[in-house]
Amino acid sequence: MRPLLPRLLTLTGVLLALPVWAGKLALVIDDFGYRPHNENQVLAMPTAISVAVLPNAPYAREMATKAHAQGREVLIHLPMAPMSKQPLERDTLRPDMSSEEIARILRDAVNKVPYAVGLNNHMGSAMTASLPGMQKVMQAMSAYHLYFLDSMTIGSSQASQAAAGTGIKVLKRKVFLDDTQNVADIRRQFSRAVEIAQRSGYAIAIGHPHPTTIQVLQQMLSTLPADIVLVRPSQLLNEPEPRYAPVPTYLASQPIAPAPKRLRPIQVCVIKHPLPAISQHELWRQLGHNIVTSPAVSYLKQHWQTWLG
């Protein structure tokens, strides 16, 4: 067995060298349940990659169970009506459905996709653009501990508005990896997702178990920048808005106006009601949670087996 001390020192050095604000990248692979051969190749990738399973697919239960056993996050990939006319999955949600019918379909999907902690839409440009339709979806979801990942198949999605007041948390897809199955295009989209995560703090990218997508992921996951960590979508539920946005070029070129000659004194905020004291137990609990969910620990979980040989 190789000496552990040098390797542990290397691990420590790498962790200390990680940027404090590492970008978080969540990858979700949709359409699971139809192609076990391709999907098993996805399941050979880092376990931070999550899978979204079509509830009526022939291998839905098998693939959801296998992914969960690996420690992956499982989502229900729920079919929703698109704007275009095309063949639809059975039990595709439509805006004109009753609340009872939507609740039945969701209940059936939860039973067919075990261990699901989230739900995202399969197609759905017509359904997600309907506020009344999505309000019925969110009402049905409130019976389960699920978050909603909006695949953003249409820019006018009403998912976030529909979730207001329901307790359902909503995430939004930022990048589609494989609108085409061209390797160069997929590589470009993956790099774009990485850049968004670096610039804004986090990004969610969605792909599919196509051979070309699998090929690109196998190549590019091994060369992720050191300031990017793979995370599960649920780890982004409490993320604040992006830490900063790039300055528009038209503003960057504008001269800065001189400060006024007379400045009013800064007003001091008076705390009318002091914040309650934090107990020692709560302090340690919060500290432990922050350490466990930190980018450094996520990075260590992804790479420690490789480094230890």
Image: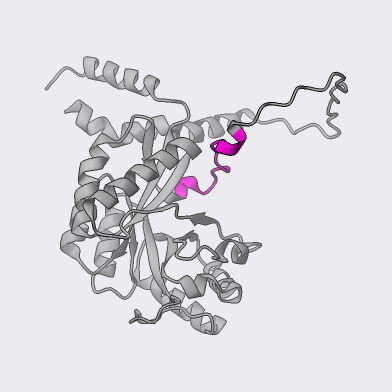
Is residue 278 visible in this depiction of the protein?
yes
Residue 123 image position (x, y, % from top left): 40, 70
Quadrant of the image occupied by residue 180: bottom left
- Main secondary structure type of the part rendered in magenta: loop
Residue 175 image position (x, y, % from top left): 40, 52
Determine if the magenta segment contains residue 235: yes
Is residue 48 visible in this depiction of the protein?
no
The N terminus - image quarter: top left
Give the residues drawn in magenta, as a range.
234-251
Quadrant of the image occupied by residue 80: bottom left
> In the image shown, does 285 or 173 lie closer to the viewer?
173
> In the image shown, does 222 or 52 lie closer to the viewer?
222
Residue 4 image position (x, y, % from top left): 21, 19
Residue 121 image position (x, y, % from top left): 43, 67
Figure colour scheme: one colour
286 vs 106: above or below: above
Residue at image coords 28%, 68%: 61
Residue at image coords 60%, 63%: 163
Residue at image coords 83%, 31%: 271
Residue at image coords 54%, 37%: 246
> In the image shown, does 176 or 90 lie closer to the viewer?
176
167 vs 217: above or below: below
Q: Residue furthest left?
A: 1
Determine if the magenta segment contains residue 111: no
Question: Is residue 273 found left or right of 206 in the rendered image?
Answer: right
